């Protein structure tokens, strides 16, 4: 539960800020998707944009908690015979 | 030597190592006792005020349109008499700075006032707990129900509670979406249940958020998820009003008979009834001192005052006080004198400056905006009559809610004039693009870039005028 919160919640907050900043500057109809102008409705573009940001930020949070594991957690298989 | 350990781990909780223990404990469900009193009344007053505003605003009509609408499709924010465009993000920035400093200011004076009385998490938790109490009964009844095996009655009570929460959450989600998508269209869609897919999605998404946060997560949001809870400590100082247990007066705590001479028995005023813990929405014991979990709701003050009344002891065993006041035995007067101190003066000074900037910015905000773009495809054209022509594209934004006509003039070069359009009509709150041919006689200006300006005036209002700089290219 804690890990879920740590991954999904900070990324949610940052995604909300990123969404607001990005779409303040860029109008949805100015966007291109693989060379073609985006023809989705504005609400759909905003929504997909938000989940895109959330996904990217969540991946970053996931990488952070992955790298943050302590030596003990990584080496726990060998805890039975610790060496200095 | 250690062998290389594969990075993947089997499923299951990691075992804590010797030096780094996992401090996360599985949450114990709190059944919070409801409380009445001065501060509970304040909280309910703020629940009513904030929610009447939140649920009511989308229904308000202004200038024949929704008074407050952040229209995402049109990329315009309607706010009563104002229409804001993405270019006005400056005002939003100032507003956010004001909100931040207001939060700092109130926190420096009296701790987590926002958290205890006005934060949506607190407000919705309060509403959800009220529904819970109406359906499942008071704290004791709910704890009994928690322990009871599933039965027809328990199923009905739980179902009723979850159903009522869900309905309330859906209404909340609907209201939220009505801030971004016109309410009238949403209402029509609601009648035939023909919402756009994304509108429906966001109603359910925000509704689910409300339901989970206020119904199930509750104090965990404040303890584990709220960024403000983590840094609020830096705004505190020894003169900040916080909810304080007077342990000099209360200790040693202990049970006693009403009216007995407890002081002779060496006891303090705290009768150790534990009600301050039962009413705490975060489940802490305020008698252990200020803790970061404390959201400053003052429920324990209300509860303790009632107990003190029953025991015929003076109120205020738990009260708003400051660290200095407790140490130096100050009265209310001294506490109030110390509200004025460098920290609060700096916060309020910055706050006042930004408020003034916002008011000034809004008061002097132009209702006309023009972007001039030189046509880069054709640089300078020599016409048959020998004159030199440059082509410009003007984006004229009419930020009022009525149609407006504008006159366009040009200057900055000898003999410069516009061929064709010199008047443009722009519908209410729209942008109109116009292409202009600007002609200059040969010999005017130097070869290369020359300064040039456009002047745009509203026909109906002399004060609405803008001068936009650009350049005119003369051939070499």
Image (cartoon, grey):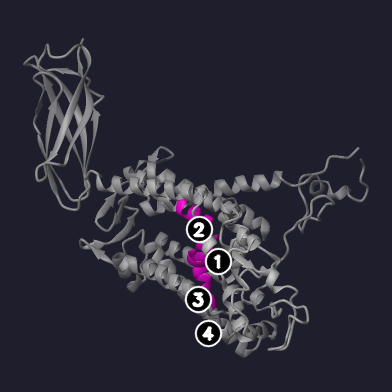
Q: Indicate the position of residue B87 as horizontal and vertical percent values.
A: 32, 42
Q: Which residue is mark 2?
A: B337
Q: Indicate the position of residue B406 as horizontal and vertical percent values.
A: 12, 40
Q: Quadrant of the C terminus of chain B?
A: top left
Q: Secondary structure at mark 4?
A: helix
Q: Quadrant of the N terminus of chain B?
A: top right
Asked if residue B209 can be seen in this view, the reply is no
Q: Which residue is mark 1?
A: B213
Q: Earlier in the sequence, mark 1 or mark 3?
A: 3
Q: Which residue is mark 3?
A: B38
Q: Earlier in the sequence, mark 1 or mark 2?
A: 1
Mark 4 → mark 2, Cα distance in angstroms: 44 Å
Host chain of mark 2: B
Q: Indicate the position of residue B247 as horizontal and vertical percent values.
A: 69, 69
Q: Secondary structure at mark 2?
A: helix
Which residue ends up furthest to the top in the rendered image?
Answer: B476
Give the number of the mark in front: 1 or 3.
3
Mark 1 → mark 2, Cα distance in angstroms: 39 Å
Magenta-span inclusion, residue B421 = no
Mark 3 → mark 2, Cα distance in angstroms: 24 Å
Give above or below for A82 relative to B166. Answer: above
Q: Residue at x 56, y 47 (%)?
A: A57
Report whether B265 appears left or right of B292.
right
Give above or below for B295 relative to B257. Answer: above
Give the number of the mark in front: 1 or 4.
4
Give the number of the mark in front: 3 or 4.
3
Have a look at marks 1 and 2 and say if they share a chain. yes
Instruction: State which region is magenta.
Output: B101-129
Host chain of mark 1: B
Query: How many other residues sit within 10 Å of disc 3, few (<14), some (14-19) or many (≥20)?
Result: few
């Amino acid at each position: 539960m804690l890990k879920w919160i740590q991954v999904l919640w900070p990324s949610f907050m940052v995604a909300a800020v990123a969404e607001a900043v990005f779409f303040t500057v860029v109008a949805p109809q100015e966007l291109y998707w693989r060379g073609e102008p985006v023809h989705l409705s504005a609400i759909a573009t905003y929504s997909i944009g938000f989940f895109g940001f959330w996904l990217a930020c969540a991946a970053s949070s996931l990488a952070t908690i992955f790298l943050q594991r302590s030596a003990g957690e990584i080496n726990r298989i060998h805890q039975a015979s610790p060496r200095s | 030597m250690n062998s290389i350990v594969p990075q993947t781990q089997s499923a299951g909780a990691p075992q804590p190592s010797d030096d780094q223990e996992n401090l996360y404990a599985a949450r114990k469900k709190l059944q919070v006792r409801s409380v009445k009193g001065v501060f509970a009344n304040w909280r309910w007053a703020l629940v009513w005020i904030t929610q009447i505003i939140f649920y009511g605003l989308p229904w308000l009509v202004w200038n024949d349109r929704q008074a407050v609408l952040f229209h995402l499709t049109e990329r315009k924010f309607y706010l009563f008499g104002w229409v804001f465009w993405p270019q006005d993000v400056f005002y939003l920035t100032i507003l956010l700075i004001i909100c931040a400093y207001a939060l700092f200011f109130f926190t420096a004076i009296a701790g987590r006032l926002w958290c205890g009385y006005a934060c949506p998490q607190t407000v919705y938790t309060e509403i959800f707990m009220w529904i819970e109490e109406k359906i499942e009964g008071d704290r004791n009844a709910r704890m009994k129900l928690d322990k009871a095996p599933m039965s027809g009655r328990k199923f009905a009570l739980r179902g009723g509670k979850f159903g009522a929460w869900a309905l309330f959450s859906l209404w909340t989600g609907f209201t939220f979406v009505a801030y971004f998508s016109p309410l009238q269209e949403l209402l029509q869609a609601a009648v035939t249940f023909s919402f756009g897919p994304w509108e429906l999605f966001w109603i359910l998404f925000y509704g689910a958020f409300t339901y989970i946060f206020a119904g199930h997560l509750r104090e965990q949001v404040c303890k584990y998820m709220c960024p403000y809870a983590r840094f609020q400590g830096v705004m505190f100082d020894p003169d900040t009003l916080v909810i304080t247990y007077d342990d000099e007066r209360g200790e040693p705590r202990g049970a006693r008979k009403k009216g007995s001479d407890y002081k002779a028995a060496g006891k303090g005023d705290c009768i150790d009834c534990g009600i301050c813990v039962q009413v705490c929405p975060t489940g802490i014991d305020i008698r252990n001192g200020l803790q970061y979990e404390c959201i400053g709701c003052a429920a324990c003050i209300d509860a303790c005052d009632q107990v003190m009344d029953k025991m015929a002891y003076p109120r205020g065993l738990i009260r708003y006080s400051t660290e200095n006041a407790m140490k130096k035995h100050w009265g209310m007067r001294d506490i109030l004198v110390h509200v004025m101190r460098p920290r609060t003066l700096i916060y309020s000074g910055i706050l006042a400056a930004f408020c003034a900037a916002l008011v000034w910015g809004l008061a002097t905000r132009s209702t006309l905006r023009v972007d001039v773009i030189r046509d880069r495809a054709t640089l300078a054209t020599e016409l048959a009559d020998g004159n030199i022509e440059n082509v410009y594209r003007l984006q004229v934004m009419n930020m009022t809610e009525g149609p407006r006509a504008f006159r366009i003039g040009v200057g900055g070069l000898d003999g410069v004039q516009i061929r064709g359009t010199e008047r443009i009509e722009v519908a209410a709150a729209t942008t109109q693009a116009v292409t202009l041919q600007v002609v200059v006689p040969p010999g005017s200006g130097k070869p290369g870039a020359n300064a040039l300006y456009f002047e745009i005036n509203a026909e109906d209002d002399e004060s609405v005028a803008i001068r936009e700089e650009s350049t005119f290219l003369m051939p070499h």
